[in-house]
Amino acid sequence: MEKNKRTPVIAGNWKMNKTPAETFDFINEVKPLVKDADCKVVFCVPFVDLESALKASEGSNIHIGAQNCHFEKSGAFTGEISAPMLKSMGVEYVIIGHSERRQYFAETDKTVNKRLKAALSEGLKVILCVGETLGERESDITEEIVSKQTKIALNGVEAKDLENIIIAYEPVWAIGTGKTATSDQAEEVCLYIRNVVSKLYNKEVADKTVIQYGGSMNAKNADELLAKTNVDGGLIGGASLKSEDFSIIVKAASK
Ligand code: PGA
């Protein structure tokens, strides 16, 4: 599995943080810090912050994403946002299937698949999240879980669409807990996911697929995690809210 075939992607997942005004200031602050990045830089921000994030990032190497989208184009779905709405604003990326959506908002593998396909059909790039809970890891079913999540999410997705899909391996027990997976654990599961993609499609597609690690990645541990052959970047929560920490992670991915 050749790492040099893939450009790493460092994506910030702000979750429910920052107002539009704070977004504008933050993106302007981080711009000069990441301008020489040798990796892709993305911020996935709350819906209401998208416009100011897009404005602040104009002409820079920073790409903007949302954190979810609905599977229908429009209709009676109070509180939801559709893929065409995001696309029309100029949004490029969208996170689909984050464990917090699965855990708190009843997202299932099936709805993840529907949302992912809706996003792709609008030409959005998807960051698909998969990962096991602590109980699942302790029961030694990590591989079964990430395999099932990946296979159902990609059901009906053509090989050519994989270039618009990033898979983020995010062990649920490592998210926001300060408990990072070891670099070996991250590498092991990212490689496993790559093999799942290879079996679903082929080795060429799998070799090109960007697979990130996410879960308490920070300025201190990024170097070690990102050095692993099958870890092609990170999905960063807490550390993406601080410009200095985020830019250190971007530098680690640029090596
Ligand atoms: P964390 O979040 O970096 O704060 O653990 C990662 C994520 O949920 O994507």
Image (spheres, rainbow, N blue to C red):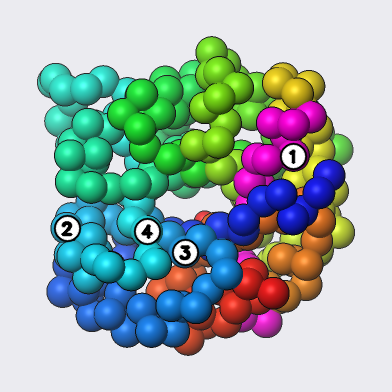
Q: Quadrant of the C terminus?
A: bottom right
Disc ID at residue 207: 1
- Whether label 3 touches label 4, CB < 8 Å: yes
Q: Which of marks 3 and 4 is nearer the N terminus?
A: 3
Q: How crowded is mark 4: few (under 14 residues within 10 Å), some or many (20 or more)?
A: some
Q: Look at discs 2 and 3 and give the one toward the viewer.
A: 3
The residue to which callout 2 is attached is 51
- Distance from disc 1 to disc 2, alpha carbons, whole Å, reads 34 Å
Image location of residue 131, percent across then percent down: 65, 42
Quarter occupied by the N terminus: top right
Q: Give the Cα separation between the discs numbered 3 and 1.
A: 21 Å
Chain part drawn in magenta = 203-220
Q: In this view, does 6 lie above or below 52?
A: above
Residues tagged 4 and 1 counted as in contact (Cβ below 8 A) = no
Identify the residue at image location x=68%, y=40%: 208
In the rendered structure, the answer to whether residue 93 lies left or right of residue 129 reads left
Q: Where is residue 75 in the image (x, y as percent from the top left)?
A: 14, 20
Above or below 195: residue 15? below
Q: In this view, does 174 lie above or below 199?
A: below
Dot 4 or dot 1, earlier in sequence: 4
x and y, in percent, of residue 72 in the image: 26, 20
- In the figure, residue 137 lies in which quadrant? top right
- Checking the image for residue 41, the label placed there is 3
Label whose residue precedes the other's in the sequence (2 or 3): 3
What's under tag 4, amino acid-wise? His
Q: Vertical placement of 224 versus 109: above or below?
A: below
Q: Which mark is residue 139?
A: none
Tell me whether circle 2 and circle 3 mark residues in contact (CB < 8 Å).
no
Q: Are marks 1 and 2 in contact (CB under 8 Å)?
A: no
Q: In this view, does 204 lie to the left or right of 120?
A: right
For disc 3, the neighbor class at 10 Å (few under 14, some 14 to 19, many from 20) is: many
